[in-house]
Amino acid sequence: MNGTQRPPEPPLELTFVAELRMFLAPANRAGTVRMATDGTPSLGHVVESAGVPLTEVGSLLVNDRPARPSYQPRAGDRVRVEAVSRPQPLPVPRFLLDVHLGALARRMRLVGVDTAYSNDLGDDALIDLANSAGRVLLTKDRGLLRRRKLWLGAYVRGARADDQLADVLDRFSPPFAPWTRCLICNGSLAPVTKSEVEAQLLPGTRRTYDEFCRCAGCGRVYWRGAHSRRLAAIVAAAARPPGATDPGATA
């Protein structure tokens, strides 16, 4: 008995904007991913299965119409995946960084951004702390960003801490308040008189400097010492708009 064979269903087609293609497998870096679907997984699951965490995704368009991550795509759907908009609004601009971003944490504190960091927290503890404190978890671990119980996270772009700082400032545009946070504990700094901290100073510092701040959290004392020029350069670079050149740089 001869039967009629059903033609194969057309694949689901996802097109990712350029900003998201870094997350795709090398074979898909042109930006288009085609895959079969049985209509069961959600669109959010499909996008993440292609390698892109939903924390990095903005608008989703299915056949040119807005869709939610919960939408169940059908064969033949054409999906456009946009990147999250910048600056990304936050209820409160405060952050928690994972163990690999210690240098970035110090720079974020240097420019006055509320930044929690510990080098001994596992993934579950990080997520619990981010959720309970209402902090955005910053990481380069895509698997961590795909954890369903994480309330809000973001992937940090860049290999160098200065580039990572520029990325975070561009993405979230937090208030810029240099020299107001402790680099060690994230506490607030307040000016103090020399006499208030004199007992904590080494003789050379006591003779050379007259202006000091102290952390309200850990009591650490700060002054514009030997490293201040390097730190000031980090602050100046962070204050420049993305793409702007250093006016003091030479060709």
Image (tube, rainbow, N blue to C red):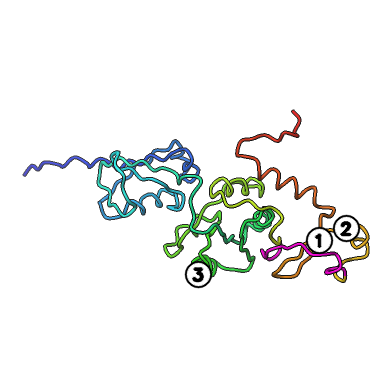
Mark 3 residue type: Ser
- How far apart marks 3 and 2 lie (CA) works out to 41 Å
- Residue receiving disc 3: 132
Mark 2 residue type: Tyr
The residue drawn where x is 47% and y is 41% is 21
Give left or right: position of 91 versus 115.
left
- Residue receiving disc 2: 209
Nearer to us in this view, 118 or 233:
233
- How far apart marks 1 and 3 lie (CA) works out to 34 Å
Is disc 1 in contact with disc 2, using a CB cutoff of under 8 Å?
yes
Q: Which residues are magenta?
A: 184-198
Estimate the x, y position of residue 119 in percent, counting from the top left: 64, 65
Disc 3 packing (10 Å; few <14; some 14–19; many ≥20)? few
Q: Earlier in the sequence, mark 1 or mark 3?
A: 3
Residue 214 in the image: above or below residue 20? below
The residue drawn where x is 80% and y is 51% is 228
**Residue 54 shows which numbered tag?**
none
- Residue receiving disc 1: 212
Disc 1 packing (10 Å; few <14; some 14–19; many ≥20)? some
Estimate the x, y position of residue 147 in percent, counting from the top left: 45, 62
Local SS, label 1: strand
Q: Is residue 130 magenta?
A: no
Q: Nearer the viewer, mark 3 or mark 2?
A: 2
Estimate the x, y position of residue 22 in percent, counting from the top left: 50, 43
